[in-house]
Image (cartoon, rainbow, N blue to C red):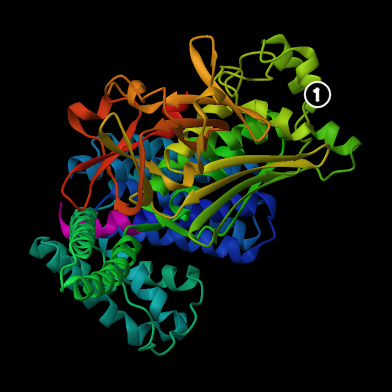
Amino acid sequence: MNEFVEQFIIESRDLVEQASGDLLALEHDAGDKGRLDSAFRAFHTLKGGAGIVDFTAMARALHAAEDVLSAVRAGTRPITPALIGDCLTCLDQVVQWLDAMETSDELPAAAEAQADAIVARFAEENTPAAAAQTAAARSMPSSWTLARAILEEQCLLLAEAGPEGLAGRVASAARAAANVLRASGRDAADVEQAGDAGYLIAAITQALTEAPMPEKASAPDDTAPRSFRVDAERVDALVNLTGELTVAKNTAGHLAKLAQDGANPLAAALAEQHAQFDRLVGALQHAVLSMRVLPLRQVFQRFPRLVREMAVKLDKSARLVTEGDDTEADKAIVEALYEPLLHVLRNAVDHGVESATERAAAGKTDVATILLRAGREGEHVVVEVEDDGRGIDVARVRQVASERGVGSAESLAALSDAEVIDLIFAPGFSTASEVTGLSGRGVGMDAVRSAVERLGGRVSVESRAGRGSAVRFDLPFSVMMTQVMTVEAGGQMFGIPLDAVVETIRVPRERIKPVGAAYAIVHRDQTVPVIDLARTLGHGKGADRTAEATLVTVFSGGQLGAFEVERLGARVDVMLKPMAGLLSGIPGVSGTTLLGDGTVLLVLDILALLS
């Protein structure tokens, strides 16, 4: 792709994000002049960029939206939900065009007709004036459209002079337009026409008159942070190399231990060098993984529009407020959060937020607030969705759980409210009485918990009757760097993620009792299923049942269990590589890494094994 066009696509996506946020804010606060000006500037700049790359259809569509926003700024047109919807539809079309350009490296073939549809949304229906406006826009010479867009951008910088200072400025602006045209490969006739100050005087005057007065540019700050774009593949390659260094570090530690066990005179020196190597690799891991991070804004920005549309579909009033969207996390975390967050937000709008009548009766504001926030707590990233709705109906959850055989009426009655709320994570559990476009399809919070725990995180829910509920995700900062505890089962070493380990215990064999075809142990007043790890993974006949049992108790997905192993190993920092190719379908294994002695360590998927 032409680098000029590639930069246009990147910048246009940022402007679409800015304009979308401004429009959604204006829908709830029509008097916010700052948001209105920001939205207008975003549309104006988008239009200018479209002109520079000679995308006249996109420029026409954006110009129609810009005219409407200009009328709002002038006080001749009010902000209405329909107007906001039309502007958002225009931005949706822009995103589709950008996607098409990114895929095909060409301007979309159907763009003219699509632009006509956008212009028609903003114009008065079936009026001669609207038809004439559309025809005039379509017949405008491409060189004029391009040069005008360039000049409008130039005039934003010259606006301090005002219309009265036009004469002294127009020649340099026209020359700038001609230079850009010439650099973009346009023919000499177009360049000459664009550089004609007289031909462009009207456009410049209009741009100067309509353009908002920009703030004076401040002196450049030499201490300001600088950034540059790096291809994601290069960052991933660096991460892989860091993983290899981690393996080398573990190997050095293994050799140092062998030297110490063999009373080698170099053992002390090797241990000292390994400790230094460990510190340096740890610092490198932190630096490299920080290059893979993305702000959660990348996923948060997709939801305000979706929440608005869900609320409209359900005839409710709700707005989404985001906080902490500059919080950073590994890109694998950020990219995987969309689906679980979408489901939680859908639940908040569908089940949590009351109707306008119910909110009024409860003394609440007409518009419900759903808060999506993020932050860092130590090495973890916390994401929360909180609403001010009705909260979770604990009695209703008990009733549905009883109807669906989750437990007996007596056992369910004995559960605390918190334990009942946790039942919403049961597979297929839903309190929806009918199937709609948003709920009742049996794809529930169990899918949310599974998705989050695949990332090494945990999900919890809090609810306050009549005041709302909050869903919390506790996530690791990175899914690639993790700590595991090694164990031996069936003569092979395996890794158990340390976050899932509760404790290790040794118990007499007679305490492990058969329960049907399985086994369990009563530990700390809880019945804990016991899984023979070797037998489950198909390695040998399982542990010797005449000896004392070594158990590793684990907790994942709301389930407590114990793995019987033959021997406990050490704690190891690893760069986890996901299973790929033919190995990707192996059940119970989440990834691999190399130990210091060169053997491959399979890291277990605890949730899959417990399920």
Judging depth in this view, the residue of 219 and 256 nearest the camera is 256
Which segment did they paint magenta?
1-11
**On the picture, is 388 further left or further right than 481?**
right
Q: Is residue 196 visible?
A: no
Q: Position of residue 156 (x, y in %)?
A: 41, 74
Q: Position of residue 451 (x, y in %)?
A: 46, 35
Q: Main secondary structure of the magenta part?
A: helix
Above or below residue 362? Residue 161 is: below
Q: Is residue 330 visible?
A: yes
**On the picture, is 201 further left or further right than 562?**
left
As for residue 136 lying within the magenta part, the answer is no
Specify the quadrant of the image occupied by residue 275.
bottom left
As for residue 8 lying within the magenta part, the answer is yes
Q: In the image, what residue type sits under mark 1?
A: Ala
**On the picture, is 347 further left or further right than 1?**
right
How many numbered markers are drawn?
Answer: 1
Judging depth in this view, the residue of 226 and 581 nearest the camera is 581
- Packing grade of label 1 (10 A; few <14, some 14-19, many >=20) is few
Q: Position of residue 608 (x, y in %)?
A: 42, 27
Above or below residue 298? Residue 378 is: below
Secondary structure beneath label 1: helix
Specify the quadrant of the image occupied by residue 464.
top right
Judging depth in this view, the residue of 384 and 173 nearest the camera is 384
Q: Residue at x 21, y 67 (%)?
A: 194
Q: Which residue is mark 1?
A: 414
Q: Position of residue 446 (x, y in %)?
A: 55, 27
Q: Residue at x 27, y 50 (%)?
A: 55
Judging depth in this view, the residue of 26 and 518 nearest the camera is 518
